[in-house]
Amino acid sequence: AQVTISHGNARVLAELPTGESVVVLLHGATVLSWKDAAGDDKLWLSEAAKLDGTKAVRGGIPLVFPVFGAGSNGDKTKDLPQHGFARNSRWEFLGKSTSEGDSSNVKLDFGLSSESLADEYRKAWPYRFGLLYSVTLTRESLTTTIVITNDGDEPFEFQTLLHTYFRVKDISKVSIDGFDNAPYIDQLAARAAKTQTGAITFNGELDSIYTPAGGPAQPITLHEVGGRQCLRLVRDNLDDVVVWNPHAAKAAGMADFEPKDGWKTMVCIEAGSVRGWQKLDKGDAFEGAQTIHL
Ligand code: BG6
């Protein structure tokens, strides 16, 4: 049996002969779905998510670049949309690769560059860059890798983040390990600097930027008390992790967030580089990745 690929005008689907699958929307190169062999989706996708290219996708794995949130880099970011333009641009599918005769994994490559960027974004961020985004599906993991190159003469600064929406059974029973002693910025408390003690649990809205104390090598695990789910997230060269759950009031205020009580069955764990700015000189490249293990 072979890896099955179907490539439509709007999305690419890959399925392993053993049943695991991934779906990537060309709008934003957004991973919409990642299913295990039993057909269980590990990602949360809003029932009201816009998939027609009119808005960033509410769910899955939107890609944040070149700015996180509203941006704070003065003139350089003032005209950029929230979370940048990558999640709002149409990417090109560059093809798939598998090792010869090996149907236990598949890698899908997507590209976006300054040349193919919409005029408004190019005006807002006039640098020459290339983005290569790879989505690798194996029987027991999903890896997403971003490679950013500076193809121009001017140096530029950026932030990037893999904004993963995980599906959970019950947010009140979720705990996330890997954050003990992590300094963090509480985005709900005027960006106050705090330090995490023990695991992250949820009893209300949460929106914080953590920098795990063990560095990018510090693994992060998602547990559900009484549930069987336990995912492990391993980062490469991504120092920061945003954890976000909007709870009832914020979910009510998002038109594309459905069902309205969907906040109970999702949590965003977002690996990235967003506390400071990564600088890329002419000709340089940055690579960052996450692997989510079942
Ligand atoms: C998170 C931010 O990464 O994304 C939150 O920390 C934000 O502050 C959330 O609300 C969703 O952002 P958006 O632009 O997709 O509504």
Image (cartoon, grey):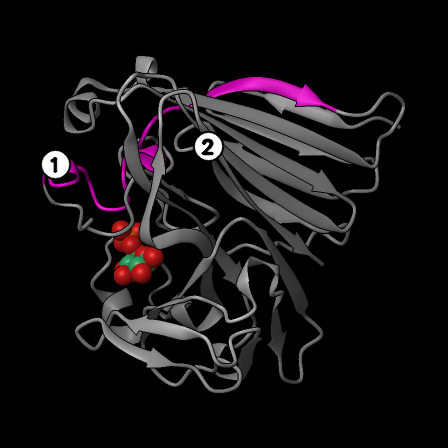
- Expressed as whole percent of the image width and height from the top left, the position of residue 156 reads 28, 31
Q: Nearer the viewer, residue 181 or 205?
A: 181
Amino acid on which disc 1 is placed: Asp
Residue at 67% across, 78% down:
227
Q: Name the residue under label 1.
A: 79
Give the quarter of the figure containing the N terminus.
top right
Count of picture labels: 2
What label sits on residue 29 in the rendered view?
A: 2
Q: Which of marks 1 and 2 is nearer the N terminus?
A: 2
Q: How far apart are marks 1 and 2 (CA)?
A: 22 Å
- On whether residue 78 falls in the magenta region, the answer is yes
What label sits on residue 132 in the rendered view?
A: none
- Expressed as whole percent of the image width and height from the top left, the position of residue 211 reads 43, 66
Q: Is mark 2 on a helix, strand or loop?
A: loop
What segment carries the magenta color?
Answer: 75-97
Q: Is mark 1 on a helix, strand or loop?
A: loop
Residue 228, located in which quarter of the rendered image?
bottom right
- On whether residue 269 falls in the magenta region, the answer is no
Q: In this view, does 202 lie above or below 16?
A: below
Give the quarter of the figure containing the C terminus.
bottom right
